[in-house]
Image: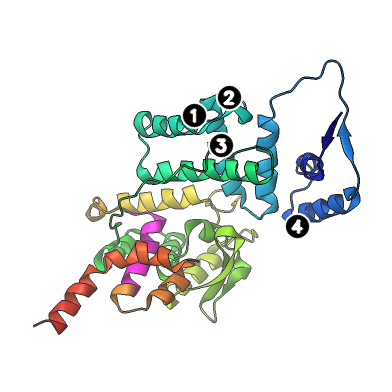
């Protein structure tokens, strides 16, 4: 009979519990109870004459999804990882224990050559694949990690588009109602991510202090700050609503459900289409975010403050994304200090 370790048993049970328990905290408590209850026991898998060494790929995949949920990953992250890992496994078309680094390199090469993945996309797929196999190896589910030698490709960092003051005002003038104005003003003045914007509730807003509580990447809580201009349109928008949904922004049509990121992008697309002066302008939620970060740096704000405003955990993220955009600041410094 095959002896099972406690980790295998716990993960198998947790796989079943995730179908009836959604809260990560309760799942974690259940996991701890299982470990305490099974401590010191020896567990064996009963074998029959019909038993064979079955492929455990699907079982390992489900266990990894449980691991992500228990570690507080967002539903969006779990969904993205699940889609990508399944796609990789389907392309390789081997049992998990038979996959080699050659198979993984072949999959990544296929994506870059035949699917036209950009360098950033390629790296994202690689990181997801490497994370999956690293976890399998660390959990002793694989004797070796075939993905450990996969290296990201260098990404060419280009200056992303931003909005100048004239363009920002043209966007505001193209808005047709208080909801559109409130969204545009909040996106720019707070530097909020679109996922954070959609997750906001009315109760999260402190109008007296011009701030709000959002939950960013990794469910991390942080404060954002907005302008009096954004406050005016937010209040007017909320006063115009007749629904009782707790969400800060909801759909126009009944039943007025919480707005989603794709809906925000669609709103900005419609705003842009109303003014021919914006035809060559890229208008997305992230462009507003990049614009406020760039404006702060160009006006002399310390990098640490910009990182704090935008919710960057690593200062290098801010440095890589925004310092290259402050060329105007460099030019002004040159004119001022170099004769």
Residue stretch in magenta: 283-296
**Badge 1: residue crowd in 10 Å (few <14, some 14–19, many ≥20):** some
Lower position in the chain sequence, tag 3 or tag 1: 3
Task: Please provide percent x and percent y for residue 135.
Answer: 63, 45
Distance of mark 4 from mark 2, alpha carbons?
Answer: 35 Å
Distance of mark 2 from mark 3, alpha carbons?
Answer: 13 Å
Give the residue displayed 59% in from the left and 64% down from the top.
220
In the image, taking residue 106 as reference, residue 215 lies left or right, namely right
Distance of mark 1 from mark 2, alpha carbons?
Answer: 9 Å
Distance of mark 4 from mark 1, alpha carbons?
Answer: 37 Å
**Badge 2: residue crowd in 10 Å (few <14, some 14–19, many ≥20):** some
- Point out which mark residue 85 bears: 3
What residue is disc 1 on? 103
Task: Please provide percent x and percent y for residue 182.
Answer: 45, 65
Secondary structure state at the residue bearing disc 4: helix
Give the residue displayed 52% in from the left and 52% down from the top.
252
Distance of mark 4 from mark 3, alpha carbons?
Answer: 25 Å
Question: Which residue lies most toward the top here?
Answer: 50
What residue is disc 4 on? 25
Image quarter hosting the N terminus: top right
In the image, taking residue 257 as reference, residue 70 lies left or right, namely right
Foreground label between 4 and 3: 3
What residue is disc 2 on? 94
The reply to whether callout 1 and callout 2 are in contact (CB within 8 Å) is yes
Decide whether the magenta segment is chiefly helix, strand or loop: helix
Secondary structure state at the residue bearing disc 1: helix
The reply to whether callout 2 and callout 3 are in contact (CB within 8 Å) is no
């Amino acid at each position: 009979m095959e002896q099972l370790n406690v980790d295998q048993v716990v993960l198998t049970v947790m796989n079943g519990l995730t179908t009836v328990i959604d809260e990560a905290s309760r799942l974690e408590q259940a996991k701890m109870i299982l470990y305490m209850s099974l401590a010191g026991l020896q567990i064996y898998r009963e074998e029959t004459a019909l038993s064979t060494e079955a492929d455990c790929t699907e079982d390992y995949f489900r266990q990894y999804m449980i691991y992500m949920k228990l570690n507080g990953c967002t539903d969006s992250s779990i969904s993205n990882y699940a889609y990508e890992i399944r796609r990789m496994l389907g392309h390789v078309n081997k049992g998990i224990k038979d996959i080699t680094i050659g198979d993984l390199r072949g999959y990544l090469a296929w994506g870059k050559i035949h699917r036209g993945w950009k360098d950033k996309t390629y790296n994202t797929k690689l990181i997801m694949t490497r994370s999956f196999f690293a976890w399998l190896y660390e959990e002793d589910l694989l004797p070796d990690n075939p993905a450990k030698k996969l290296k990201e490709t260098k990404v060419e960092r280009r200056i992303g588009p931003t909005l100048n003051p004239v363009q920002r005002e043209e966007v505001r003038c193209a808005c047709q109602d208080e909801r559109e104005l409130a969204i545009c003003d909040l996106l720019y003045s707070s530097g909020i991510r679109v996922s954070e914007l959609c997750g906001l509730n009315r109760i999260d807003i402190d109008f007296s202090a011009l701030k709000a509580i959002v939950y960013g990447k990794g469910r991390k809580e942080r404060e954002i700050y907005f302008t009096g201009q954004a406050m005016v349109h937010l209040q007017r928008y909320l006063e115009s609503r007749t629904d009782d949904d707790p969400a800060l922004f909801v759909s126009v049509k009944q039943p007025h459900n919480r707005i989603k990121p794709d809906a925000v992008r669609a709103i900005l697309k419609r705003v842009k289409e109303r003014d021919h002066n914006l035809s060559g302008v890229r208008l997305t939620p992230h462009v507003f975010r990049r614009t406020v970060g760039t404006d702060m740096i160009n006006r002399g704000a310390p990098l640490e403050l910009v990182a704090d405003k935008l919710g960057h955990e690593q200062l290098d993220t801010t440095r890589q994304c925004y310092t290259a955009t402050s060329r105007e600041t460099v030019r002004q410094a040159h004119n001022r200090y170099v004769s």
